[in-house]
Amino acid sequence: MRRRAASLGVAWVVGAALLRVTLLAPETCPPFTAADARAAAVAAAEWITVNQGPDGSYLYEYERDTGRVSPAYNLVRHAGTTMAVYQVVAAGETRFLAAADRATQYMLDRMVVTGDDAASWAEPGGDLQLGAAALLAISLLIRRDATGDARYDAELIRLGNFMVAQQLPDGVMLERWVRSTGAPDPEQRSRYATGEALWALAFLNDAFPGHGFDDAAWRTLDYLSLRRDDEEDLFPNPWPDQWAAYSLAQMGPWGLADHHIAYARRLAQAFGVQVRWDSQRTGGIATLSHPPEPRGAGFGTVLEGLGRLGVLATHDDRLADIDETLAARLVCGAARLAAVQTGPEDVVDDASREIGAWFRDGVTRMDDQQHAASGMLWAEAVLRGEER
Amino acid sequence: MTGFVAVLMTVLAAWNPAVVAERAPTATGRRWIGMTLAAVVGLGLALVADRVLDVLDVSVPTFRTAAGTVLAVTGARWLAGQSPHRDEGDPLLLGVIDIATPALYFTMVANSAASGWWPTAGAVAVAVAATAGLQFAAVPQPALRWLRRLIAGTAVGLGVALIYAGIRAV
């Protein structure tokens, strides 16, 4: 009996200790207010715009220990970063409007006509990317809503027509339009661009009903909800696609089917577990047992996804059971991400290239600030009890 | 598998009446008192499951993942380890040791936090009845061995299912 009692005691003590530093490490969410969220978003927008070049392009990537600036650039990320700055403008920080407009002009200067009343943009000689078109469209739509300025409506319709032309009848979106052939590449898809295009099409339909953008959006939403992750062999499955979350929130008022809601629930689960996991990185062994250290871009997309699905859940009774949990995860995740944003006291070398940024392994990239800023705005809305 | 059925299956798997009956083939009053005391402690913890999770600072899905891990490891040990054998000692303490296992307590708390205390208590009552039934029916040891393995395999499967459910939750 003594042996059994001893082994049970060891199982309890050793098992409990092991669990406590691994799976049962405490989930820690720092205190966080709406003002904190706004300050983090604004600091990120400051980083983006302070480091903007005269031609409207952004600082792409910066390594703070060496001061090295990456010569690389990514057009889709340029468009996405511009979108985030317009989101900050839409939240009331209008001083960033001029910088966002310069970045927009960078894209509009590179427009290429691809068909009858259809156009997108790329560097001279380069192929056109669906994601770049979608995020430019979304940027212009957010700008249109924020300013009431309709000067880019013609460009928006052309971008919409370009995206529809990239769609296959079953809702699949083709990622690339090849300049040399003047047609989409039938083989190339993108795990990011499909959701980006879907949100753009849905957003366009709300702004310009009657152009058929809704039919295209429904086809691609069905593809995302029912087949995309399997057909494109994405891992994890469901792919935690914050662009799909934006799309679901945009299309929520249209009346989603049950399979769309089921997809939204699966996405919410995919985002929620990432916040729970990260919140257990509380130092010591728990940090080692809860890798990897998230970067601003990756964790920012989680916040964006939680924020937009939260909006959907507040309006759709079928998701009412996860409404409060989504909000709690969003705020917790935002608090944790804000806690590791570079502040004045953390500067290593160059304040203008560090303050407001999220570094991992000493490196920050513009989309770290893009996604984190967007996510912070959704957290702010939840903390204020608002809806955006 | 949802609701009470899920609670019942996991509690039965974590209790494993066949293991208890292998160790104590016949019912004795003091051993049952010990088992009952341990079960009451477990039910008490289950009753304050939310408070337990608050003190630990973990969410329901996170605790469910941990409980699933404990259940799966315990099931694997029953499958791969030595057969339980009759043991000597104070029957009351032996009864406590039979029941006060991490697998059962973690499972009870996880179930109670997610599905409520009454289903958990109901599942414990079924497990008690199943154990008593095996003892009173004097089921032969070879049959108990196979039943223990069957429940152990089920515990592994349910443990993995609990881990999955914990991960696939907001």
Image (cartoon, coloured by chain):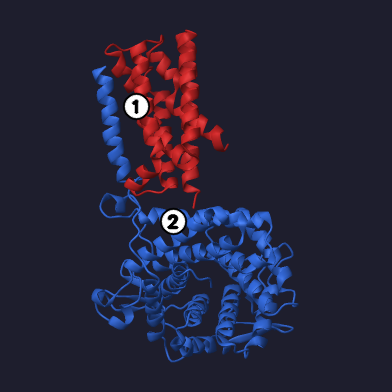
Chain colours: A blue, B red
Q: Is residue A195 left or right of residue B143?
A: right
* Residue type pointed to by label 2: Gln
Residue A364 versus residue B86: which sits nearer the camera? B86
The image quarter containing residue A223 is bottom right
Q: Does residue A67 lie above or below A273 as drawn?
A: below
Q: Which mark is residue B100?
A: 1
Q: Does residue B66 lie above or below A263 as drawn?
A: above
* Residue type pointed to by label 1: Ala
The quarter of the image holding the N terminus of chain A is: top left
The chain that hosts pointer 1 is B
On the image, the x and y values in percent for residue A15 come to 31, 36
Residue depicted at 51% across the width and 53% down the height: A269
Q: Give the secondary structure at mark 2.
A: helix
For label 2, the residue is A274
Residue A158 versus residue B38: which sits nearer the camera? B38
On the image, the x and y values in percent for residue A150 come to 63, 89
Q: Is residue A278 visible?
A: yes
Q: Is residue B72 left or right of residue A148?
A: left
Residue B72 versus residue B62: which sits nearer the camera? B62
